[in-house]
Image (cartoon, coloured by chain):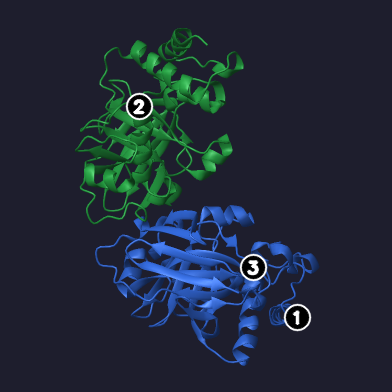
Chain colours: A blue, B green
């Protein structure tokens, strides 16, 4: 698919040069969701050519605030690459990104592979080894975040970096739907939320992912980590900002920006 | 400014179930005067009532900014405002009901004085519970200024609380809350959405009463303020709040 390669090249260059490009649908209005995932797949091939590996996935557009923000009505997914993963407390350079925004999420770590179709939230729970507090930095290679659903899908579901808390907490006795979250910037509360904001339940979100990947023959593997979706409306950060998310029962995760 | 006349206007609106224009369209009203009107209105609607069920409002920064104020407000429920679990809400008796999800505190000890903090509140709390606060502004379209809504008893109308649970071991700032209407997610939040910590909102109430020379007796129930934006309800609707490890409570409307 020639246009997929062309779009993937353009997105790859935009990410590398930190120079956003116009929405893909401006030059090709007929792009479908299937086309967009084909572009994403070629974009990922190019990134993996520079090193790293796929260590999991992120879900996007799983909460109504995010769907309203982008004017869409379904979730999407993108890869988490080893080169995008950071430990708690990391200092990230804003210059490495174009127009980053931050989101607090519940991430799930798989103890066993999870393969759709037909995966339910209960089955997903059996494959999940535990949950971890996470911050996701999203970024758009599309100018001014003027993204349609197909634009963001093609663009790695706008993924940029993920910071994980230090503890993977087993799910026993925890209903992830009800787990609360408070995110603060420079000590001031910006937003609160709970797990149900992620597609009704983080486990429903990972089940959706397993089922959505199934037709492509993609299996969620043991050790993969899945960012299940923002629990609040993403917000922009500035140099010098410190962001900390406290996730009830899972602990906190923080990062700084320079 | 005639406290008795304004109180009569409000009490008549409650009894008739009819909206009225904001009081401040006609009169100048300070917040302190508005609390006097609130007291007088409650005496008309519920003479000698115990006033031991309280609700707080404007407890989120977003709402305070929207109203251009920097502090919350309180209202008191009249006798008979409490709904029991399983009881339905008769929306026909109300003007324009809206429901807010909240965390409620049942105080086991008296709290008093200008120095009360969230820590004192937590130490004095016998139990917490999930709560649904049914608002019913007597002002058409919820169009009001701060003195109007203070006089109008913080739009208090009805409330429903779930089973009391000890708060020990639960961080009420990070505890998660899920608000649903008709089985669909409305919004989620954590306790910190209420003034940073819901116990801080209760402490504000104790200090505010201290300014008026009053104490908050043991046995007082305080609905600490909404965790999300309010939703309107109509016959056939049901709303539900779930607070992690504290429980859930659901209200059906007729």
- Closer to the observer: label 1 or label 3? 3
Secondary structure of residue under mark 3: helix
- The quarter holding residue A12 reads bottom right
A21 lies left or right of A46: right
Q: Give x and y (percent) for residue B7.
A: 44, 12
Q: Nearer the viewer, residue B200 or B154?
A: B200
Q: Is residue B3 visible?
A: yes
- Where's residue B239, x and y in %? 38, 38
- Mark 1, secondary structure of its residue: helix
**Residue under numbered circle 1:** A6
Q: Are marks 2 and 3 on the same chain?
A: no
Residue receiving disc 3? A152
Mark in front: 2 vs 3: 2
- Dot 1 and dot 3 residues touching (CB under 8 Å): no
Q: Are marks 2 and 1 on the same chain?
A: no
Give the mark, 1 or 3, whose residue is nearer the N terminus.
1
Q: Nearer the viewer, mark 2 or mark 1?
A: 2
Instruction: Using the rendered image of the protein, determine whether residue B253 is visible from the camera's viewpoint.
Output: no
Q: Residue at x 65, y 73 (%)?
A: A155
Residue density around tag 1, few if under 14, some if 14–19, many if 20 or more, within 10 Å: some
Q: Classify mark 2: helix, strand or loop.
A: strand
**Given the image, what chain letter belongs to the residue carrying mark 3?**
A
Where's residue B72, x and y in %? 45, 36
Q: Is residue A17 above or below residue B118?
A: below
Q: Residue drawn 55% across and 61% down? A: A61
- Chain identifier of the residue bearing label 1 in the image: A
Measuring 63% from the left and 77% from the top, which residue is drawn there?
Answer: A40
């Amino acid at each position: 698919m020639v246009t997929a390669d062309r779009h993937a090249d353009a997105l790859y260059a935009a990410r590398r040069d930190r120079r956003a490009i116009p929405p893909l649908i401006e030059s090709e209005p007929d792009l479908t969701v299937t086309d967009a995932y084909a572009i994403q797949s070629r974009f990922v091939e190019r990134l993996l050519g520079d090193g790293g590996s796929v260590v999991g996935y992120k879900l996007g557009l799983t909460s109504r605030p995010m769907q309203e923000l982008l004017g869409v009505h379904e979730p999407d997914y993108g890869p988490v690459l080893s080169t995008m993963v950071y430990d708690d407390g990391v200092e990230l350079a804003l210059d490495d990104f174009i127009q980053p925004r931050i989101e607090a999420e519940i991430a799930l770590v798989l103890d066993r592979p999870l393969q759709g179709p037909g995966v339910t939230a209960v089955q997903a729970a059996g494959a999940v080894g535990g949950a971890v507090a996470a911050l996701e930095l999203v970024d758009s290679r599309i100018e001014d975040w003027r993204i349609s659903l197909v634009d963001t899908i093609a663009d790695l579901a706008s993924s940029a970096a993920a910071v994980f808390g230090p503890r993977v907490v087993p799910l026993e006795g925890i209903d992830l739907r009800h787990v609360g979250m408070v995110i603060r910037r420079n000590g001031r509360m910006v937003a609160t939320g709970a797990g149900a904001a992620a597609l009704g339940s983080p486990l429903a979100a990972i089940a959706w992912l397993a089922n959505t990947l199934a037709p492509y023959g993609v299996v969620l593997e043991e050790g993969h980590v899945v960012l299940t979706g923002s629990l609040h409306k993403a917000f922009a950060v500035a140099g010098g900002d410190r962001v900390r998310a406290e996730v009830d029962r899972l602990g906190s995760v923080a990062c700084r920006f320079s | 400014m005639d406290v008795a006349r304004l109180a009569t206007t409000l009490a008549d609106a409650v009894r008739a179930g009819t909206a009225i224009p904001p009081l401040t369209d006609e009169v100048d009203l300070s917040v302190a005067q508005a609390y006097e009107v609130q007291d007088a209105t409650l005496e008309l609607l519920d003479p000698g009532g115990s006033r031991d069920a309280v609700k707080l409002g404007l407890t989120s920064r977003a709402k305070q900014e929207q109203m251009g104020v920097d502090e919350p407000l309180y209202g008191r429920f009249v006798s008979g405002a409490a709904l029991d679990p399983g009881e339905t809400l008769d929306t026909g008796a109300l003007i324009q009901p809206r429901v807010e999800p909240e965390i409620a505190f049942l105080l086991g000890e008296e709290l008093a004085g200008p120095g009360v903090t969230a820590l004192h509140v937590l130490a004095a709390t016998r139990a917490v519970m999930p709560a649904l606060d049914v608002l019913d502004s007597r002002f058409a379209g919820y169009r009001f200024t701060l003195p109007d809504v203070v006089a109008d008893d913080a739009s208090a109308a009805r409330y429903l609380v779930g089973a009391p649970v000890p708060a020990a071991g639960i961080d009420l700032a990070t505890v998660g809350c899920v608000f649903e209407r008709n089985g669909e997610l409305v919004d989620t939040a954590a306790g910190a959405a209420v003034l940073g910590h819901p116990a801080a909102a209760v402490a504000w109430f104790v200090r505010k009463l201290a300014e008026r020379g009053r104490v908050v007796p043991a046995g007082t129930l305080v609905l600490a303020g909404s965790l999300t934006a309010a939703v309107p309800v109509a016959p056939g609707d049901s709303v539900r709040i779930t607070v992690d490890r504290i429980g859930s409570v659901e209200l059906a409307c007729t």
